[in-house]
Amino acid sequence: MKFFIDTANLSQIREANELGVLDGVTTNPSLMAKEGIQGVENCKKHYVEICNIVDGDVSAEVIATDFAGMIKEGEELAALHPNIVVKVPCIADGIKAIKYFTGKGIRTNCTLIFSPGQALLAAKAGATYVSPFVGRLDDISSDGIELVSKIVDMFTYYGYPTQVLAASIRSTQHIIQCIEAGADVATCPLAAIKGLLNHPLTDIGLAKFLEDYKKVNG
Ligand code: E4P
C-alpha cells in the first residue's frame, strides 16, 4: 500500500519524506488555506515546492466547478510538474473533465467520493485515483472503511485500473483498517503515519537489548 501525506505544510512533508516511505502528497483548498497560501500564482509556486521535495504523485485541486473552468485550471496545474495529479470534485462537470483529462494523458484524482456509484462513474471516466472520505463518513455515523472495501471489491471485480486512495484518514487505526480493506493508497496526517511506529514491546525490547549490551561492554 502506498502512503501519501495529507497536508500542504512543507515542514511536515519534509519530515514524512525523510522517513523514506512517502509515496506522494494530497492537498485540498482547505489545507492550502490553512498554510495561508493566497492567490493562484502562490498556489502554483507552493505545488512546485511540494513536487521538489517528494518524488511521487502530488494532488492539486481545481477551484472551478464548471467544465471549461476545470479544464483550464487542470491543464495549467498539470503543466507545473510531471508529478501533479489534477484533483477534481465528483460532480457532473467533474466527471466530464476527468474523461477529457484522461484523453489528454493528464492524471486525475476524483475527490469527495461518498458512495460506490460515484466511484464507478469516476473509474469509467478514467480517473487515476478515487478518494473515498473515510473520516467524514464516520463523522455522520456511517462506515467509511466499509465504503473503501466496497470500492476495492468493485474495481477488482470489473478490472478497473483506478486506484482507491483512502482519504480523510484521522487515525493510525484507520490506516490499519485501510490495509485490511485493500486500499491502494492511504493519505494520512503525519501523526497517524508516525503512530504506526508505536509499540510498547519495541520500546521494552530495545531498552533490554541496550541494558544487556552495557552489562558486558560498559
Ligand atoms: C484528501 O484528499 C482530502 O481532501 C482530505 O483527506 C480530507 O480530509 P478531512 O476530512 O480530514 O478534511
Image (cartoon, rainbow, N blue to C red):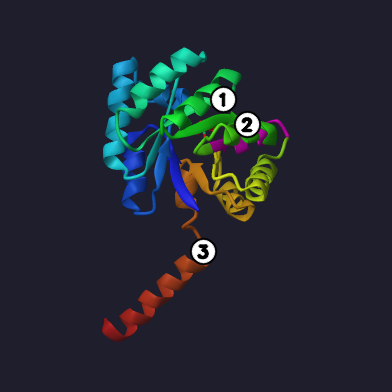
Stretch of the chain drawn in magenta: 130-141
The percent coordinates of residue 74 (x first, y second) are 41, 23
State the residue lying farthest toward the right: 141
Position of residue 122 in the picture relative to residue 50 (left or right): right
Q: Earlier in the sequence, mark 2 or mark 3?
A: 2
Compared to residue 147, the image places residue 22 above or below, namely below
Q: CA distance from mark 1 to mark 3?
A: 46 Å
SS state under label 3: helix
Counting the numbered discs, the total is 3
Amino acid at dot 1: Ile
The residue sitting at 47% across, 67% down in the picture is 202
Q: Which residue is mark 2?
A: 121
The residue sitting at 56% across, 49% down in the picture is 175
State the residue lying farthest toward the front: 103
Q: Which residue is mark 1?
A: 95
The percent coordinates of residue 4 (x first, y second) are 44, 44
Position of residue 31 in the picture relative to residue 43 (left or right): right
- The crowd level at tag 2 (other Cα within 10 Å; few <14, some 14-19, many 20+) is some
* Numbered label attached to residue 20: none
- The crowd level at tag 3 (other Cα within 10 Å; few <14, some 14-19, many 20+) is few
Question: Can residue 93 be seen in the rendering of this structure?
Answer: yes
Q: CA distance from mark 1 to mark 2?
A: 7 Å
Q: Nearer the viewer, mark 2 or mark 3?
A: 2
Residue 50 on the magenta span: no
Q: Which residue is mark 3?
A: 200
The residue sitting at 50% across, 23% down in the picture is 97
Amino acid at dot 2: Leu
Q: Relative to the observer, which residue lies in front, 11 or 120?
A: 120
- The crowd level at tag 1 (other Cα within 10 Å; few <14, some 14-19, many 20+) is many
The residue sitting at 59% across, 44% down in the picture is 160
Position of residue 67 in the picture relative to residue 51 (left or right): right
